[in-house]
Image (tube, helix red, strand yellow):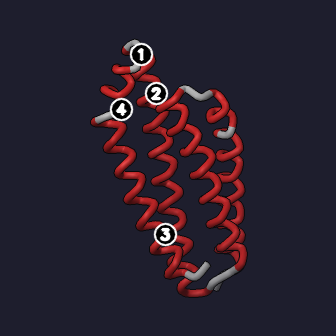
């Protein structure tokens, strides 16, 4: 991926993260309350959604940093790092989002795989930085 594409992608992912965070803060409690969930269950789901948003935003910033580096000196390792972060966002954050809305236990099972993708992305990011000048 080109640096410019990564910069655009990070802007889009940040906007999505903010929108999901706003939904979680303003609409999720009412939505879950209509499903008959108790206050403690609603609070747990809100916390899980917020964790998903937080991790999405952290890794969106990482993609932004990779984009800046790719503009200067693109590397395959930087691109691989970005893909790992994207997969991590989809599995970790996406799994938490789905679980928060539906209580689908299968969605929660992919969250740790997303975490491994994040770890892999950070290792690849470090390698990419080490190889750049």
Label 4 element class: helix
Q: Foreground residue, 50 or 35?
A: 35
CB within 8 Å, label 1 to label 2: yes
Within 10 Å of disc 1 (Cα), the crowding (few <14, some 14-19, many 20+) is few
Foreground: disc 1 or disc 2: 1
Pointer 1 or 2: first along the chain: 1
Q: Foreground residue, 33 or 124?
A: 33
Identify the image quadrant of residue 46: top left
Mark 2 sits on what residue? 45
**Residue beneath the point at 43% across and 38% down:** 50
The spot of residue 131 in percent (x, y) is 71, 79
Q: Quadrant of the N terminus?
A: bottom right
Q: Tag on residue 28?
A: 4
Q: Judge left or right: residue 89 versus residue 40.
A: right
- Answer above or below: position of 29 versus 61: above
**Residue beneath the point at 61% across and 86% down:** 73
CB within 8 Å, label 3 to label 2: no
Mark 3 sits on what residue? 9
Mark 1 sits on what residue? 37
Foreground: disc 4 or disc 2: 4
Pointer 1 or 3: first along the chain: 3
Q: Foreground residue, 125 or 27?
A: 27
For the residues labelled 4 and 2, the Cα–Cα distance comes to 9 Å
CB within 8 Å, label 1 to label 3: no
Label 3 element class: helix
For the residues labelled 1 and 2, the Cα–Cα distance comes to 10 Å
For the residues labelled 1 and 4, the Cα–Cα distance comes to 12 Å
- Answer above or below: position of 50 versus 103: below
CB within 8 Å, label 1 to label 4: no
């Amino acid at each position: 991926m080109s640096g410019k594409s990564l910069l655009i992608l990070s802007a889009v992912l940040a906007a999505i993260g903010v929108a999901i965070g706003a939904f979680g803060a303003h609409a999720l409690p009412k939505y879950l309350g209509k499903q008959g969930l108790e206050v403690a269950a609603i609070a747990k789901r809100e916390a899980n959604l917020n964790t998903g948003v937080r991790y999405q935003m952290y890794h969106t910033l990482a993609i932004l940093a990779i984009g800046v580096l790719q503009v200067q000196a693109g590397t395959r390792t930087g691109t691989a790092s970005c893909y790992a972060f994207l997969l991590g966002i989809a599995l970790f954050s996406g799994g938490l989002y789905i679980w928060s809305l539906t209580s689908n236990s299968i969605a929660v099972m992919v969250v740790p795989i997303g975490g491994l993708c994040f770890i892999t992305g950070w290792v690849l990011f470090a390698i990419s930085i080490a190889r750049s000048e």
